Image (spheres, rainbow, N blue to C red):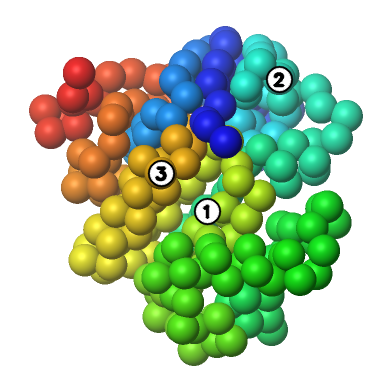
Amino acid sequence: MSGAEVDVRHVRKSFENGRIRALEDVSLHLEPGELVALTGPSGGGKSTLLNLVGSLDRPDAGGILVGGLDVTHLHDAARYRAETVGFVFQFHNLITTLNALENVQVPMLGGPRSRAERERRAHELLDEVGLGDRARSYPPTLSGGERQRVAIARALANDPQLLLADEPTGALDSETGAQILALIRRVRDEHATTTLMVTNDDAVADQADRVLQIRDGRLSAPATPALRPQS
Ligand SMILES: Nc1ncnc2c1ncn2[C@@H]1O[C@H](COP(=O)(O)OP(=O)(O)OP(=O)(O)O)[C@@H](O)[C@H]1O
Ligand SMILES: [Mg+2]
């Protein structure tokens, strides 16, 4: 499985009957397997853009192609989200009454895998994020970084072609955040998953292939020298 190409074309999105213009004519292109950081001030439109690419919401205008599929007018957005996209959020969103192994299986429910296959896959994923020995642990007993690793394992359950991460290190101390970022990079390196990651941490953004900034609903090149694209 390799990563999807992502094409965002002239997307606009407003809320509250047009009073809040969250995105104004945003276009961007991600190559398959690219890891791109999205930065910018609070309220700039980062999460809105991620939600549109993940088909959690629809733009007012413009198109979004993921692997050639227009995800703005899907009949079955739930299927696209389950089969093509992995989501990681700032706060892991794990189900506290399920253990790590069960949480990782949630995206596979309703898919083609048998119960035994789901469980085997979940063990494999927990091993991959270094938590093979915590499979039976419940989220409240895990550290913040461990919970986020479970959330990443869950996001990878269905071999997504696109990983969308909204401040995945935002709730972590810098050392733990660096470990989570290293994991996201390793996932990208090993699976060639196209990754779009919101972050306001310069050290995190620096590890991306490319950094984009969004401000007042518009994309721009970052102003900080440290955040300039590498190539
Ligand atoms: N469901 C909504 N209803 C109304 N306004 C919204 C909604 N979602 C976002 N907005 C507004 O759209 C703008 C962009 O919000 P967005 O959440 O995309 O910003 P952000 O860049 O992710 O900010 P932060 O860094 O604080 O998470 C903001 O003005 C926000 O208040
Ligand atoms: Mg946000």
Q: Amino acid at mark 2?
A: Leu
Does residue 37 sit above or below 186 in this rendering? above
Indicate if the residue with disc 1 has its beta carbon within 8 Å of ligand 2: no
**Reading the chain from its start, which is encountered first: label 3 or label 1?**
1
Which type of secondary structure does the marked residue at label 2 adopt?
strand
Q: Measured from the top left, where is residue 30 in percent x and y?
A: 45, 21
Residue position marked by numbered label 2 in the rendering: 69
Q: Which mark is residue 59?
A: none
In the picture provided, is 49 more to the left or to the right than 120? left
In the picture provided, is 55 more to the left or to the right than 221? right
Identified at 45% across, 63% down, the residue is 128
Residue position marked by numbered label 1 in the rendering: 88
Q: Measured from the top left, where is residue 174 in percent x and y?
A: 22, 63
Identified at 55% across, 16% down, the residue is 7
Name which quarter of the figure residue 17 lies in.
top right
Q: Amino acid at mark 3?
A: Glu
Residue position marked by numbered label 3 in the rendering: 190
